Image (cartoon, helix red, strand yellow):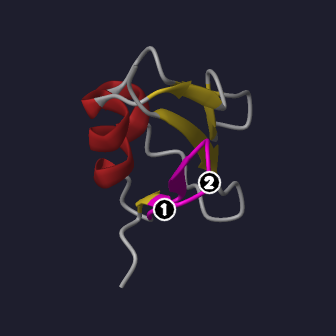
Amino acid sequence: MGDRWHVEVDRSVCIGSAQCVHRAPDGFRLDTGRQSRPVEADTDASEQLLAAAESCPVEAIVITLSAGGESVFPPEE
């Protein structure tokens, strides 16, 4: 069984570039305020979701392991 991730978008940082929606259309949606939201907060780990987080120009997407809360993205310094 693969990892489960918890995905959050910091709405105070999100600028609505929609890069996450383009990279992972099944993982993110823009709301009426043109800010990103994860389709599911807890989901199976996927390369698409990681690529979406990496493509965010303001690093508004935070991914942690559902079990334990260790950081997946952004990487810890």
Q: Amino acid at mark 2?
A: Gly
Q: Where does the magenta region start and end?
A: 59-71
Instruction: Name the quarter where the N terminus is drawn.
Output: top left
Residue 38 inside the magenta-drawn segment: no
Provide the secondary structure element on which disc 1 rests: strand
Front position in the image: 33 or 60: 60
Compared to residue 30, the image places residue 7 above or below, namely below
Residue visible at 44% across and 65% down in the picture: 58
Q: Position of residue 62 (x, y in %)?
A: 53, 55
Disc 2 element: loop
Badge number at residue 68: 2
Q: Quadrant of residue 35?
A: top right
- The answer to whether residue 5 is left or right of residue 13 is left
Give the image quarter of residue 32: top right
Question: Badge 1 is on which residue?
Answer: 71
* Foreground residue among 52 and 69: 69
Q: Is residue 54 left or right of residue 59?
A: left
Q: Amino acid at mark 1?
A: Ser
Q: Residue at x 61, y 44 (%)?
A: 67
Q: Quadrant of residue 43?
A: top right
Question: What residue lies at 41% left-to-right and 65% top-to-bottom?
Answer: 74
Give the image location of residue 71, x and y in percent.
48, 62
From what the image shows, is residue 25 above or below residue 8?
above
